Image (cartoon, rainbow, N blue to C red):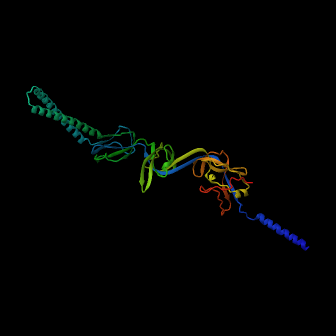
Amino acid sequence: MKRKKWVIGLCIVVAACGLWLALRPSQKNGITLETATTSRITISNSITATGTVEPVTEVDVGTQVSGIIDKLYVDYNDVVKAGQLIAEMDKVTLQAELESSQAELASCRTEYEYQMKEYARTKALYEKELVSDAEYDEALYLYEKARNAYDQAQAAIVKVKRNLGYATITSPIDGVVISRAVEEGQTVAAGFETPTLYTIANDLTQMQVIADVDEADIGQVADGQRVEFTVDAYPDDIFTGTVEQVRLEATTESSVVTYEVVITAYNPDLKLKPGLTANVTIFTLEKEQALAIPTKALRFVPDEELLDALGLDIAAAAAGESGKRELWVKQGATLTPRYVTTGSSSGDRTEILDGLADGEEVAVGLTSEQPAAEVSTERSPFMPGPPDRNKKKK
C-alpha cells in the first residue's frame, strides 16, 4: 500500500514537471518572420520650397522726357492693347522747343546757302588768280562753318521731334494694368533713370512662380519636372506647374544659399494674382509601374537559430555578383538568397531592375510580439556576414 502511494506521488511529480516544461515561457515565443510581396508602384521623391507668383511677361512703362503728366487714360486692372494711348505729358514746353529748333534750322540753312554762293564765286576768281590765298581760305572756312551749323541744326530738330513724340505714351504690349505710379498733374523728372508710370502684365492666364530652392536640393531639380503648389488665398486648391528654368545665379542671405527656379503655371480662372506667396513641391523623381520592395529588405541578415525555431531553412548562398545587392526570397519554408540590381529609391521603397519577379515574397525582418524584446536582423555596411551563411542547414 505504501509502495502504491509512492508510485502515484512520483507520477504526479513527473506530470507536473512535464506540464511546467511544456508551458514555461520561451525566448523564441512571439517571434515571426516579416515578409513583403513585390509589387508595381509609383516611386516618387520631392523637395519643398517657397516662391512668389509673378506674370510671365511684365513691362514697366515710363517716360524719357521730364515734365508734367497732363492726362492718364487707363487705370488699375484696365485691359490695354499694343499701341493704345495710355498717358500724355504736357507738350507746351516741348512744342516751344520744336518751334525754336525750326527757326534755328531755317537761319542755319539761309546762312549755309549764302556762304555756299560766296565760296563758289571766290573759288572761280581764285582759279583765275584774281583773289589772294587768304581771301579764298576765309571763304572756304565760312562755308564749312555754315555747313556744319546747318547739319547740327538738322540733328537737333530730330531730337526735339522725338522728345515731343515721347510725350505721347502708348502701351508696348497687350495686357492688363497691374500698377499705376503717377497722378495727373504730377511732375516727373527723367534724370539718371526712366520714371515708371505703369506696370503692364501681358497675360494673366499664364503665370510663373519664382521659387527659392536651397543649395542642398538644387542638384535634384531639372527642367520639365512636375510641380504642385498652394497659396494661402486658396488653401484648399492645389495648382500645378512645370519647372521651366533653373537659374545659375546664387543668392546668399543670412549665410543661406538659394537658387531661383522658374515654374510656369496655367491660370485659366485668374485665381493666381501677382505677388502671392506659393508653397512649392517639386517632384524630382516620378517612376510609374516600378517593381519595388521595402528598402529594409536589402539590409536583412538571416539568423539561423531564430529561423530554425520558426521551422525555416536557409539555402546555400551563391557567389555574390559585382554591382548587385543581396536579399532573401521566401519559397515555402526556405529562405533563398537572391542578387538584384536596384534602381530609384523613395526612402522606404526601392525599385528592383532585375533579379526579382512580380509577386515574389522577400524577407524584411524578424518581429517580436513582446514590447521589451528587440530582434535585430539588419546588416551593417561595415560588418561582414556570418561565417556559416554558405553552409546548408542539415
Q: Estimate the x, y position of residue 343 in percent, counting from the top left.
A: 58, 46
| Quarter location, residue 312 | bottom right
Using residue 338 as the reference point, say whether residue 246 is left or right of it: left
Using residue 26 as the reference point, say whether residue 283 is left or right of it: left
* Extreme residue in the right direction: 1
| Residue in view at x 28 percent, y 38 percent | 165
- Can residue 277 be seen in the rendering of this structure? no
Q: In the figure, 366 relative to 243: above or below?
A: below
Using residue 337 as the reference point, say whether residue 42 is left or right of it: left
Q: Estimate the x, y position of residue 140 in percent, counting from the top left.
A: 14, 32
Badge count: 0
- Position of the C terminus, as image quadrant, is bottom right
Q: Nearer the viewer, residue 86 or 65?
A: 65
Q: Estimate the x, y position of residue 47 in percent, counting from the top left.
A: 51, 50
* Extreme residue in the top direction: 128
| Residue in view at x 25 percent, y 36 percent | 158
| Quarter location, residue 29 | bottom right
- Can residue 219 be seen in the rendering of this structure? yes
Q: Estimate the x, y position of residue 179 in percent, counting from the top left.
A: 37, 46
- Position of the N terminus, as image quadrant, is bottom right
* Extreme residue in the bottom direction: 2
Q: Nearer the viewer, residue 104 or 219?
A: 219
Using residue 50 as the reference point, say whether residue 191 is left or right of it: left
